[in-house]
Image (cartoon, coloured by chain):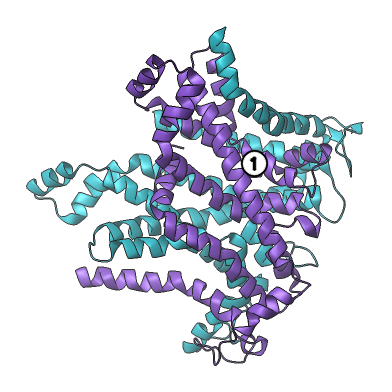
């Protein structure tokens, strides 16, 4: 009994908040998702599974999952490979190591809003005098309207390079920490067996980085799934958001809170579907790691 | 080989620094130079008077929104550290019949990123009447299952001898936690605190959803509003962005050791 009181003294405030701000919202939206709830957050008319049927047959929601897949197909492997490359380069030098590590990590201080500003209004502003178009000009290429061009969809280059710049340093730090945990004796043994540096990388470094790699891949995937900030700020204008390149959270934002009317029934159904998807992926990953 | 490594690193470093340079450059030139017909790396003249112009422009609530961001970030960092460290300690060290049940309820929330459930959270917070209100900005972000989980893992490895010595001196759980455990865990608190501060200062989706009146805008919402509407001078927008990044660059330089530790702790163990 005494322990019970002490336990709740420590855990109670946090547990109460978790209940009110995590469990109640999820429960409430599960309820709302079975109702018609336009411009109100109280259930109005029971519609059964109709919101879910609408979301799953409705083009925009499904195509938002397609947008996520395209984005993830670019950003996940690119970040993984480049962050690992930076980590290897930085950990193989001694002179100015701290300087380079800090420089690559510094963009983490920047918000996606600020990065979007630089990418949208400076580097990729579509003017002939923009930085990217100036570089193209050196090679004799015509200027490109980066963020508004849909064929070819150059906006992907803008969005992918922006996220790369912002998150590479973070994942580089994770890889450096992983590299530091590899026992030096493994490399010594490999050298005694006559392994060249490429073989040492293939047979020592990569297998030893397995835990880090799995964690990095999952974090990258979850991060891409939640992409919102740079899409909203690079492609959005005060006249609204273009009909293309809408990842799931952008789509939900405009459904539930957009200027065209607040639809919390469909918004909640969408949130429930997205939550189930991500819980499913996490559980699958957990099972894969345990095996 | 060594020279090649340094060459590759130097090229990468320049690419990483260019965006920072552009923020400052575009913030300190005249409007006509930003839309000039040809690109110049160095501006023809640096206009320091842009600072005075920015801070005296009544259309740009920069100071107000920076203060809001600072208040939100400080309260969220302090609140999250307090609530999550206490919860983590209780879960790690106080034996209780239902401890496991509570722990599973905390771990289950790790699978659901807060951003994915922003619609449900908005529904609840708006029912409480916290839209465009400091409470709505700060409180929902305090209950991070992830931070509580990290604290639990950390306290599980805390040296038991120190706690037993405190127990012999007559301290209960409460006294042991505040007088022995917390003072000996400053590095860990600093590491998670810096991460919490940076995350809070840079967060965008939740403030965008909840801070609907201009008076409650955080600096990210303010910048975004002017960016998407393109309603003020571009050089002013860049200078405001430079000002908004400055506190974090200072935090980065001063606290990098803790930041790196926080990133590794939260990245790998998560």
Crowd tier of the residue under label 1, counting other residues whose Cα lies within 10 Å: few below 14, some 14–19, many 20 or above: many
Question: Label 1 belongs to which residue?
Answer: B141
Give me the residue at 14% from left, 55% from top. Answer: A196
Give me the residue at 64% from left, 71% from top. Answer: B240
| Drawn side of residue B133 relative to residue A154, left or right | right
Seen in the picture, residue B188 relative to B100 is either above or below; the reply is below
Seen in the picture, residue B172 relative to A169 is either above or below; the reply is above
* Chain B display color: purple
Looking at the image, can residue A226 be seen?
A: no
| Drawn side of residue A146 relative to residue A291, left or right | right
Seen in the picture, residue B75 relative to A22 is either above or below; the reply is below
* Chain A display color: cyan
- Quadrant location of residue B135? top right
* Location of residue A228 in the rendering, given as x and y in whole percent from the top left corner: 64, 54
The quadrant of the picture occupied by the C terminus of chain A is top left
* Location of residue A6 in the rendering, given as x and y in whole percent from the top left corner: 55, 16
Q: Nearer the viewer, residue A287 or B12?
A: B12
Q: Chain of mark 1?
A: B
């Amino acid at each position: 009994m005494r322990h019970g009181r002490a336990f709740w003294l420590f855990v109670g405030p946090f547990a109460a908040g978790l209940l009110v701000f995590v469990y109640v919202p999820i429960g409430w939206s599960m309820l709302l998702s079975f109702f018609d709830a336009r411009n109100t957050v109280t259930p109005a008319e029971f519609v059964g599974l109709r919101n879910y049927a609408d979301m799953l047959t409705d083009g925009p929601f499904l195509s938002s999952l397609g947008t996520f897949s395209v984005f993830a197909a670019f950003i996940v492997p690119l970040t993984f490979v480049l962050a690992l490359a930076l980590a290897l380069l930085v950990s193989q030098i001694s002179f100015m190591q701290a300087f380079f590590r800090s420089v690559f990590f510094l963009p983490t201080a920047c918000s996606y809003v600020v990065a979007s500003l630089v990418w949208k209004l400076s580097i990729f502003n579509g003017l002939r005098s923009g930085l990217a178009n100036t570089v193209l000009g050196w090679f004799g290429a015509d200027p490109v309207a980066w963020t508004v061009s849909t064929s070819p969809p150059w906006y992907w280059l803008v969005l992918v390079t922006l996220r790369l710049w912002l998150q590479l340093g973070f994942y580089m730090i994770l890889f450096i920490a992983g590299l530091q945990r590899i026992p030096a004796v493994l490399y010594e043994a490999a050298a005694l067996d006559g392994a060249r540096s490429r073989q040492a990388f293939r047979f020592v470094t990569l297998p030893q980085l397995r835990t880090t790699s799995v964690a990095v891949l999952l974090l990258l995937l979850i991060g891409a799934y939640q992409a919102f900030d740079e899409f909203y700020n690079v492609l959005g204008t005060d006249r609204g958001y273009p009909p293309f390149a809408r990842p799931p959270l952008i789509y939900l934002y405009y459904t539930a809170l957009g200027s065209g009317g607040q639809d919390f029934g469909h918004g909640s159904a969408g949130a429930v579907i997205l939550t189930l998807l991500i819980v499913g992926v996490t559980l699958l990953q957990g099972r894969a790691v345990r095996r | 080989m060594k020279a090649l490594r340094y060459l590759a690193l130097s090229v990468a470093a320049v690419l990483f620094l260019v965006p920072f340079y552009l923020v400052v450059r575009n913030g300190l030139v005249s409007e006509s130079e930003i839309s000039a017909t040809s690109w110049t790396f160095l501006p023809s003249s640096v206009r320091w008077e842009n600072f005075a112009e920015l801070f005296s422009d009544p259309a740009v609530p920069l100071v107000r929104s920076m203060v809001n961001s600072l208040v939100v970030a400080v309260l969220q960092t302090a609140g999250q550290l307090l609530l999550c460290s206490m919860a983590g300690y209780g879960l790690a060290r106080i034996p209780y019949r239902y401890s496991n049940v509570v722990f599973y309820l905390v771990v289950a929330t790790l699978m659901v990123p807060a951003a994915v459930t922003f619609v449900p959270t908005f529904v609840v917070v708006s029912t409480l009447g916290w839209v465009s209100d400091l409470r709505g900005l700060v409180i929902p972000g305090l209950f991070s299952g992830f931070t509580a989980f990290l604290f639990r893992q950390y306290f599980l490895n805390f040296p038991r001898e120190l706690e037993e010595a405190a127990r012999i001196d007559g301290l209960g759980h409460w006294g042991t936690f505040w007088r022995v455990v917390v003072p000996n865990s400053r590095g860990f608190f600093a590491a998670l605190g810096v991460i919490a501060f940076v995350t809070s200062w840079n967060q965008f989706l939740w403030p965008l959803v909840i801070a609907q009146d201009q008076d409650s805008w955080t600096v990210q919402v303010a910048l975004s509003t002017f960016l998407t509407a393109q309603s003020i001078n571009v050089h002013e927008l860049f200078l405001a962005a430079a000002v908004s990044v400055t506190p974090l660059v200072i935090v980065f330089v001063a606290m990098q050791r803790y930041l790196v530790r926080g990133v590794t702790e939260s990245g790998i163990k998560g």
